[in-house]
Image (cartoon, rainbow, N blue to C red):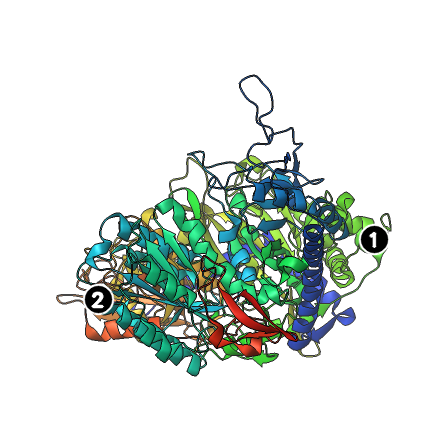
Amino acid sequence: TPVALGTGEGTGLWADTFGEDLYNTVTKYSGSLLLQKKYKDVEPSLKIEEVDGLELVRKFSEDMETMLRRKVEAVQNLVEAAEEADLNHEFNESLVFDYYNSVLINERDANGNFVELGAEFLLESNAHFSNLPVNTSISSVQLPTNVYNKDPDILNGVYMSEALNAVFVENFQRDPTLTWQYFGSATGFFRIYPGIKWTPDENGVVTFDCRNRGWYIQAATSPKDIVILVDVSGSMKGLRMTIAKHTISTILDTLGENDFVNIIAYNDYVHYVEPCFKGILVQADRDNREHFKLLVEELMVKGVGVVDQALREAFEILKQFQEAKQGSLCNQAIMLISDGAVEDYQPVFEKYNWPDCKVRVFTYLIGRELSFADNMKWIACNNKGYYTQISTLADTQENVMEYLHVLSRPMVINHDHDIIWTEAYMDSKLLSSQTQSLTLLTTVAMPVFSKKNETRSHGILLGVVGSDVALRELMKLAPRYRLGVHGYAFLNTNNGYILSHPDLRPLYREGKKLKPKPNYNSVDLSEVEWEDQAESLRTAMINRETGSFSMDVKVPLDKGCLLFSPHSLGVVLSRGHGEYILLGNTSVEEGLHDLLHPDLALASDWIYCITDIDPDHRKLSQLEAMVRFLTREDPDLECDEELVREVLFDAVVTAPMEAYWTALALNISEESEQVVDMAFLGTRAGLLRSSLFVGSEKVSDRKFLTPEDEASVFTLDRFPLWYRQASEHPAGSFVFNLRWEEGPESAGEPMVVTASTAVAVTVDKKTAIAAAVGVQMKLEFLQRKFWAATRQCSTGDMPCTQSCEDSDLDCFVVDNNGFILISERSQEMGRFLGEVDGAVMTQLLSMGVFSQVTMYDYQAMCKPSSHHHSAAQPLVSPISAFLTATRWLLQELDWGGLHARVAWEAKSVFHHSHKQKKQDQLQPCDTEYPVFVYQPAIREANGIIECGACQKVFVVQQIPNSNLLLLVTDPTCDCSIFPPVLQEATEILTLTVASAHNASVKCDRMRSQKVRRRPDSWWAGSSPLSLPAWACAPAARSTYGCQGTHLCLCFLGEAFVFMPC
C-alpha cells in the first residue's frame, strides 16, 4: 500500500472527480456562468479606466477639507460669541441664577418637586446623536463633584455663556452634520449642546472635568518639554510620598502627544525612574505616560535630598534637546515636587537659566509644613514659574492645573486663536451600543480669551470651545467603489498616529465585554502599514508631502494633506485589477425597474445619496433616497451620480439572476436532497442580491449577509470577505471557506461552507472585477461528495484496490492556508494541518508545497505572566480563535506579491522592574506568528518521511477549479517524533528576557524618536521670536505678587509696564 500510495495512483482521479462534481454543483446553483455571460454580452458598451491615485487623493482631501472647514467655522462662531458675551458681562459677586445642571435636571425630591437646578428638561431620542436622549433647542451644564455649582465664579461664567445657546442652534441648523458642540470653562463647568442628562458613577461622583481633556489642554497651551523632579528622600515618607505620586500622575494627565517628558527622582543621588530614558525626553503619548505612572508607584524613600544635582541634570537635558532641535521646540519647564528646599540654588539658575529664563520652573510644596516654603516660592518666582502647596490628595487637581494657565499667558495676551485637532479618541457613551468604527472621534477646538481692556494684559483664558467630528463620517468622503476590492483610505496625525485605518483595532474583548485598548489612540502608522520598513511613507505623510509609493502586498499608496487640520490622508490601491475602474451605463427607466426587485440591497454604509443634512432625509434608506433622486420626487437630494449610474447598470446586468435562481428553487423543491442553502452575488457598486433554496428556518448560518456579520457584507472599510477572496483567484475558480454554525445548539464545529468566484471583464486588454457570486452549503453535503469521489478507481469493472475508507489510508481536504475542511474525524475539521500531523506539514514546507511567512501584530493584547521564562509568551486568546483570525488575515491579502521578509523589531516594551498588580489584566503587546501559504505552481507532490522504525508516505493533489488540496497519508506509521507545526502567536521581547542583547534591543526601541511634525502654531513665553508684541526685561525680575501674579517689567508698544510673566 505505501508503494502504490507513493506513486499517486488513484489520488489524481479522486481529486479530479471531486473537483468536477464540486464545480458542477456550485456553478449550477450560483449561476456564475450566466452572470459571466451577461457581463460578457455588455462588454462592447463598457469602459475600463485606469485609476489616477493622485487625482483620487486630491479629490478626497478637498472634500474632507470642505467638511472640516465647516466644523472650524462653527467653532469660530462660538469663540466670537463667548468673547463678546464676556466683554459685555460685569462680574456680580452676589449673582443669583438658575441654570440646567446636567446631573440634576428632571430630578425630584421626596415631595415630588424638582430639586434646585433640576427643573424639567425635555429629552428625546435622536438618531443623529447615537439615539441618546437629547434636547436640540438648548444646552445643559455639567460640573465635576469637586466644583461647587453655586460658586460666584461658576454662576457668572454660566450666566455669561448662556449667549452660546443661540449660536449652538444656528451652527447645527447651518451644518446638520455637526455633532456635539461645547464650551469648557477655565473655572470647571462644561456647557454641552445638545443638552443631555449626565449620570454620576456608581458612587454618585461626577469625575469628568473638561479641563483634563486632551482637547482643552491642547487648545489652552502650546507644546512643551517637561522634566519632573521628585524628592524621594526620607522626609517624604508616608502621606507626602502618596501625594507626590498623585501629583506626578496628574501632571502626566495634562500632557499629550505633542509634549515631551522625563521623570527624575533624587535623594543622595540622581536617578531616572526609567533608566533607559537617561539623558533624553520621550514623547508623552499614552504608552509612555502609563509606563511612567507604573514606575512612579514603585518609588521608595530613603536618604537625603540633593536638589542642585537634580536641577543641573534637568537643565542639561532641556538644553541638549533645544540645541539638537528635538522635543517640542516650544515651551520648556521643570516641575519640582518636594516637601521643601534648604536653599534657593541661585548658582544653578545663574548658570543655566538667567537672564533669559527660557525654562520655567514650577514648584509644588508637598505637605502642611511651611519651614522651607520661602525657598520653593523664590525658585518659582525667579524662574517665571508658579508656586503652590499641596497638603491633601484632594488639592492636587486644582493646584496642578495652574501651571497650564501660566504657560497659556503669552498666547492669551497676543490673542492668538490657534485651531487644534486632537488624536482619535473614543466616545464612552457610544462604546456600549456601537461598533468600534462608530466610536472614534476627533475634536476641533479653539481657546477663548478675555477681551476686556482692564484685564487684557493679564492674559486671562476663559476656556475652550470645541466640536466633535466622527471619523467614520469623514471617511465616507473616500467612496469605497473608487478604491477597488482591496483598496482603502486612512488618516494619520502630525505625530504619525492613526486616526482612521481599516486595520486599526481600538477594542479588545475581555469575557463578553468590548473594552478600549489602553493605547488605542497612539497606534503608529508603521504598526498598521507594516510593509513600510524604512518608514518612507510615514515620513512623507508627516511632512505633508504629496506623491505615491509602491510596496509589496498593499500597493501603491498615494497621499495628500488636509489643509484645515494637521492630518494627512493616504489612499491604498492594489496592483492588477485594483488599478482599474469599470464604467457602464444604462437608461434610468430600465435601471429603476430592476433596482426595485425584492432580492436587491445596497451597502448601507456607502453614500449613494446625502441623507444626513436635511432632517426629512435622515429616515430614508440609501435605496429609498436613490429612487427619489432618480424619479425627481425630491429635487433637494444630492447623490453621487457616478455611483448611482453604476448601481443602475449592475441592477440591469444582474437582474436575470433572480429569475434563474427562482426557477432553480422551483425545480429542486421536490428533491429529497437539499444541496445548497442560498446563492448570492455582489457587485463593485455595493449592490447585493441573494436567494434562498430552503426555508429561512433551515438556513444553517442565519447571520450570513446580515449587518451582524460585518465580514459578509459591504461596509465603509471593506468589501465582503467572500468577494475579496474570490478576486484573488482566477475568474471561474471557486474559493471555499469554512464557517461555524451559530446558535445555542452549536457544537463549536464547522457546519457551513461558502464558495465564491469572481466575474472579470476585459476591455482593451484591461481587466477589472465586475462582481463576485457564490453559494452557501452544508459541510455535510461536501463530505458526501468527497467520500463518493474517493470510491472511484481506474480499474474499470475490477474492484478498487484502494479507498479513503481503508483503515490504512487517511484522507484530508485542506485549503490553500493549510486548514482542514474534510477529515474522517470531525474534531479535526477547521483545525490547522500542522497541528494534526506535524510530520507531513514539516515535509510539505521543506518541499516548497507550502511556504511559511512570519507576521507581526503590533496591536495585540497579552496576559502578563510572572512565571514565563522564555521570550515566547502565549496570548490569552484560545488557539482556535487565533487560527480563525489568522486565516481571515491570510485571505485578506494578495500573497502572490509577497516577497521574502526580514524580522521586524518589537515596539516599546516596559522596563523589567514593572510588576503588574493585577496578573489577569491584559496589556498591549507585540506578537509574531507564522502563516502558511500554498504555492499553486505545484499541482501534485508525494514523499516519504523517515520516522525512525517506519516510513510515512503521503500524496498531495490539487483539486481543479478551487483553492483546495487532496492529501492522502499512511496512518500506520507513528511519526510522533516530529513536533506539531503550530500557529501560536508569541509575544516579542517580553520583560522576562534577561539577556543583555535583548535588554539593549528593548531600550533602543523605547528611546527611538520617530519622525513627527510640530503643530503649525505654537507659543513659547520665553522666546522673543514667538512674542512679537512685547518682551520682558530680565533685570526686572521681582517677587511682587508671587502667589501666581509674578510681575515683570515689560515693553508693550511704546511704554514699559508691569505685567504677569
Q: Nearer the viewer, residue 896 or 1016?
A: 1016
User: Around disc 1, counting alpha carbons within 10 Å, would you say few (fewer than 14), some (14 to 19), or many (20 or more)?
Assistant: some
| Residue located 52% across and 74% down the image | 1013
User: Around disc 2, counting alpha carbons within 10 Å, would you say few (fewer than 14), some (14 to 19), or many (20 or more)?
Assistant: some
Percent from the top left, x then y, of residue 669? 61, 39
Earlier-in-chain disc, 1 versus 2: 1
Q: Amino acid at mark 1?
A: Leu
Instruction: Residue 815: name its quadrant.
Output: bottom left
Q: Nearer the viewer, residue 408 or 878?
A: 408
Instruction: Residue 124: name its quadrant.
Output: top right
Q: Is residue 105 visible?
A: yes
Q: Label 1: state its secondary structure.
A: helix
Q: Is residue 298 left or right of residue 287?
A: left
Q: Is residue 485 visible?
A: no
The quadrant of the rendering that contains the N terminus is bottom left
Which label lies toward us, 1 or 2?
Answer: 2
Distance from Cα at disc 1 to Cα at disc 2:
65 Å
**Which residue in the structure is indicated by mark 2?**
993
Percent from the top left, x then y, of residue 830? 38, 53
Q: Amino acid at mark 2?
A: Val
Instruction: Residue 270: name its quadrant.
Output: bottom left
Q: Nearer the viewer, residue 372 or 262?
A: 372
Q: Relative to 529, say whether 185 is above or below.
A: above
Percent from the top left, x then y, of residue 634? 85, 48
In contact (CB < 8 Å): disc 1 and disc 2: no
- Specify the label residue 630 is tagged with: 1
Q: Relative to 338, say whether 359 is above or below.
A: below
